[in-house]
Every structure is written in structure tokens, then in C-alpha cells.
Amino acid sequence: MNHKKMNNEIFHKLIQKIDTGWIFQPVLFLWDNIELLNMQVKGIIFELFWHYHIDKNHLHIFPDNNEKIKIQELRNFIAHSYIKSSYRFQVFLIENISRATLESFNASLKFLEEPWEWNIVFLTNTSQSWIPETVLSRLHIIDQFSPWIKEKNQFFFLLIDEYIKKKNLNLMKYFFQDKKIEKQEYIDFLQTFLLYIKEKLVYTHLMEQISESILLIEKNNVLPKYEIDKLILKI
């Protein structure tokens, strides 16, 4: 199945569930590349926010820092869910849930079983392994996820590398030329930049901005050149 078609189906199924008005069962997204999976899930969350006109500050993230999730940290995170959102809903994202200790998993059971009607809970992980059955039984599992980042564009990868390492201006010249640049080229550049960040472990703080820009450009909600300008100024 085409990966965009698959992701669109996931998005529309989420909308259907939200529109029923019932308490939303937490969703566990699975894929073997946790970094790309986390970015893609955040992209879908922002797309839901745009669809329902919700401020993106209503996304609460427990980020993956490669450390165990301690019980008090998780309790502090869950405490935000007791405050009703001023919008239709708010989203809680726990990245790489297998980092939780058994005590942390047990502390999350009530939150996962009854998240309240104004809370949507997303979890990510590479597999169902190491997640207790008591937790899995409370989740809707999506294990056919297909991130849109497939391969890097070597041309853009080289432009980015030379600009970052040598301040070579070919990158700026390419995007500031008079020649018309197609929308897909902007998207290819941004997707390649995400892969560059993952490979080189630099500018990781820009990953969320880049993911958001890709979605905006795909939906024709912004001028692509404006998004690139903002990004280049931060490098």
C-alpha cells in the first residue's frame, strides 16, 4: 500500500474516533525506527490540531531521553490530564513506552483505562515486547505504520553538509534563485534535512519545526520558500 495512503487512512480513522464523542482509547504506534516514528506521530498530532483548530501548546510530550521512566516523573506528567482542556481535546504523547519500569506501568493503568473525554493518549515503541499485558489490553495498536521519510536526496544532503561545515552558500543560492522551485523539491529538502540531523546528530532541536513545515507545505497552508527561509536562518 502507498505510504501516504496508509497514513491518510490512519488520520481519518482517528478523526472518526474523535467525532464519536466517546472516550478515546489510547493508541500504541509501533515501528522499528523509533526516532522517525516519534516524528511521524507528532506530525499526525499537529495535523489533528489543524483540523480541529487546536493550539499546539495542548500537546504534552514525555520525550524519549534513553533513560528509564521513573514513577514520579510519570505521575507528574499524568497530572496535566486532570485539567480539562479549553479546546475539544488535548494530546499526551509518551515516546518509547518500553522505557517505563514495572512500577511506572502500574501507575499508568488508570490513566490508560480512563483518560477522560478531553484527553487523547498516544504511545510509541518499536514492538510490543517488554510492555505488560495489563497495559497492552488497554491500548489500540497500530503496527503497520509507514513513515514518509524513506531515503535522502543526495544533492540536498551535500548542500546541507557543505553549508553547515563550511558555510558554503550554494544552499542559499539554490533556494534564492529566480528559477521556480516545485513544491516537492521543498519537501524533499526538508525530509533530507531530517535524515541529515538523525545521521549527524546536529540541530536536533529543529526536528519538530521541520516536520511541521513539511505538513504545512503539503497542505498548501504556507509559502514553501518562507519555511525554508526560517529554517536556514537558524542553522
Image (cartoon, rainbow, N blue to C red):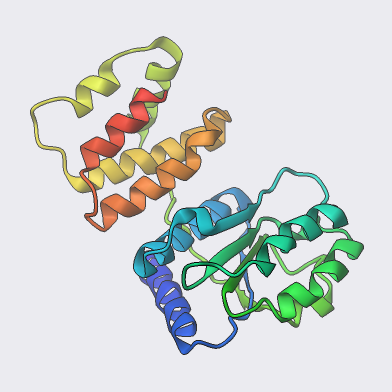
Q: Give the answer, above or below, for where 133 lies relative to 145.
A: below
Could you tell me residue 57's position as x and y percent? 50, 53
Q: Give the answer, above or below, for where 115 lies relative to 130.
A: below
Could you tell me residue 222's position as x and y percent? 23, 48
Task: Name the image quarter holding the N terminus.
Answer: bottom left
Q: Quadrant of residue 66?
A: top right
126, 57: nearer the viewer? 57
Q: Quadrant of residue 125?
A: bottom right
Horizontally, residue 183 falls left or right of residue 154, namely: left
Horizontally, residue 52 falls left or right of residue 132, namely: left
Q: How many marks?
A: 0
Q: Give the answer, above or below, for where 134 lies relative to 69.
A: below
Residue 1 seen in render:
no
Residue 115 seen in render:
yes
Could you tell me residue 214's position as x and y percent? 35, 49
Please report the residue visible at 49 percent of the width from the left and 40 percent of the height from the top: 207
Horizontally, residue 195 falls left or right of residue 98, namely: left
Task: Name the image quarter holding the C terminus.
Answer: top left
Please report the residue visible at 83 percent of the width from the left and 50 percent of the height from the top: 68
Q: Give the answer, above or below, for where 77 lies relative to 154.
A: below
Could you tell me residue 129's position as x and y percent? 78, 67
200, 114: nearer the viewer? 114
Please report the residue visible at 70 percent of the width from the left and 65 percent of the height from the top: 127
88, 195: nearer the viewer? 88
Q: Quadrant of residue 162?
A: top left
Furthest-right residue in this view = 103
